[in-house]
Amino acid sequence: MPQPIRLKDHEKDARLIRARAFVGALLVVLLTAVLVARLYYLQVVQYEYHSTLSENNRVHVQPIPPNRGLIFDRNGAIIADNRPSFSLTLTRERAGDWEQVLDVIVEVLGLSEDERALFEKRVRQGRRPFEPVPVLFELSEEQIARVAINQFRLPGVEVVARLVRHYPLGEHFAHSVGYVGRINEKELKELDPVAYSGTHHIGKTGIERFYEDQLHGEVGYEEVETNARGRVLRVLKRTDPLPGTDIVLTLDAQLQKAAEEALGGRRGAVVAIQPATGEVLAMVSQPSFDPNPFVTGISFKAYADLRDSIDRPLYNRVLRGLYPPGSTIKPMMAVAGLDAGVVTPTSRVFDPGFYQLPGHTHKYRNWNRSGDGWVSMEMAIARSNDTYFYDLAHKMGIDRMHDYMTRFGLGQRVSLDMFEETAGLMPSRDWKRARYRQPWYPGETLILGIGQGYMQTTPLQLAQAVTLMANRGKWIRPHLAKSIEGRQPVDSEPMPDIVLRDPKAWDHANFGMVQVMHGARGTAKKVGDSAVYRIAGKSGTAQVVAIKQGEKYDRSKVQERHRDHALFVAFAPVENPQIAVAVMVENGESGSGVAAPVVKQVMDAWLLDENGQLKAEYAPPLSAEVSER
């Protein structure tokens, strides 16, 4: 039987459609409400946040590095300046795969893998976000053109013009002025990130490092509007940076060159000081090096050649070189002996060519094996008689010797503004006990009396010691800065003057130094005879290798670099000291024969006019009396 046909329930269908329509409408209303609520939250509640975020995406604050202060010599000659240079920079955040970009740079410019490794090291240094990092300096016109042609392959890479440090006199002032270099990871952690924003270089050595705060300046800022690719569209606001302070040094460029010429290409050091002011007139360490490659990044090979050179051009012999002072300290020993009361100006010692401690058979030899007979203090200085000073050292004892020599600046830093200076060593009982766990022996006192043994000094310390002889004990620290923005440097920790019980002790010791140069038996008489002014000087020889007891020094049996160092200290004119000089010639052997002529050439360059006569301003005062004995 066929099924009955069901009639369509229109009412039911209508209810279902209305229910579905209601649910759909309700869902639309709910979704619309959620959307409106979200829009309200973003546009109203978080309006400030998102407007600021949007503005930051459009506006960036970029640091403007300050121009570094210039450095001049005492006569206004530029020693360190800033010159424009085109650099290649990379902004890591805009470069995408920046390592691949570096590969493209190396390919486009035809660079080496070593340079590529250096670039990567620079980029990996932690810097502020969106701060361009210089990867290559001193771009040539051809390199700039290659970068421009391949710009589409180099996102985040730009060629910018920057001022870069330059040393027009090259190697002449490398050890005194120093150089700047790229900020490394360690320095980056210690520096103020705000003060050094946009700055990629910092003083590494010398004056550049010691006066970094003054030379650096203050950073500036500019607000710039950029597009989506980070390219600057316009500058909205700018605060100009404050340039670093210019510094005028005490050094004289002409005297510096004269001192280098006097050394004649030999390894050594020269220091010249103006006694009345403590100003360092010349400071030479040879061989030297060109500091300019260090500014933009020296290659691995070039640095290795400097570092591994047997002549050590990177080594600052003036401040870091440690040498036994030899007989150069004998005048200071004479002053100490007179002030301590262990000898008098008329005290004499018989010299048979050696000295023996009471009760001992060991002979401490004089350089003159035949002996000088009866020797006074002044003659002992003039002849550099070892026997006299063995006896003086024995009478003084190590404790008093240490006290007096320390007052002359030995064994301590003496400069006011030389960062790398080494303290040297003035030994004592306590030092030896702590260092070797041994007592001090009498024989060590004797050899200390002639500047040998454990004693280690720098050429700067010797220059300061002879300056104290010229100043009759008045202490003025040697310094390189003459004025900083018109102001002279101030010594916050002045050394006490050497005040003697009888100031005439200075006269006796200085007269002995005059006899070295102008006396009939002076060790440097040949040099003194050629001078048109009077010089007070003292030679010295520093042993490099020990000679056995009883053996005589034979240069033909000693390798060149094992031969004695030659030293000489002096000041002039005697009646009106204007310059004090210390010279050390490595393996020069003879202080009087090799170092003394260097001293005189330096003095002549400073004291004489174009006619070879003593300059009028350096002439002795009319009231000065020349002591003759």
Image (cartoon, helix red, strand yellow):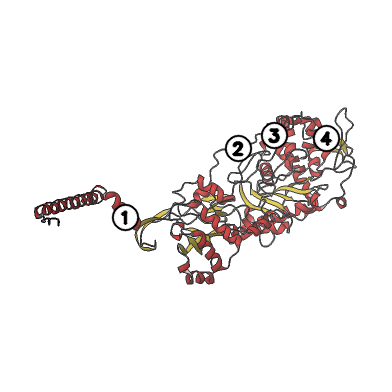
The residues bearing labels 4 and 2 have C-alpha atoms spaced at a distance of 34 Å
> Picture coordinates of residue 608 (x, y %)?
67, 57
Marks 3, 1: nearer the viewer: 1
- Cα distance between the residues tagged 3 and 2: 14 Å
Q: Amino acid at mark 2?
A: Met
Q: Give the mark, 4 or 1, whose residue is nearer the N terminus.
A: 1
Front one among 402 and 579:
402
Instruction: Give the number of the disc on residue 404.
Output: 3
Q: Which residue position is annotated with label 4?
A: 348
* Residue contact at pointers 4 and 1, CB within 8 angstroms: no
Q: Nearer the viewer, residue 110 or 552?
A: 110
At label 3, counting other C-alpha atoms closer than 10 Å, the crowd grade (few under 14, some 14-19, many 20 or more) is some
Tag 1: residue type? Ser
From the image, which quarter does the C terminus lie in?
top right
- Between marks 4 and 1 in the image, the one whose residue lies nearer the viewer: 1
Please, is residue 157 above or below residue 486 in the view?
below
N-terminal label among 4 and 2: 4
Q: Position of 35 compared to 516: left or right?
A: left
Read off the residue under disc 2: 495
> Which of the two labelled residues, at mark 3 and mark 2, occupies the earlier sequence position?
3
Mark 2, secondary structure of its residue: loop
CA separation, marks 3 and 4? 22 Å
In the rendered structure, the answer to whether residue 618 lies left or right of residue 9 reads right
Q: Crowding at label 1, few (<14), some or many (≥20) Cα neighbours within 10 Å?
A: few
Label 4: few (<14), some (14–19) or many (≥20) C-alpha neighbours in 10 Å? some
Quadrant into which the N terminus falls: bottom left
| Amino acid under disc 3 | Tyr
Q: CA distance from mark 3 to mark 1?
A: 72 Å
User: Which numbered disc flags the more N-terminal residue, 2 or 1?
Assistant: 1
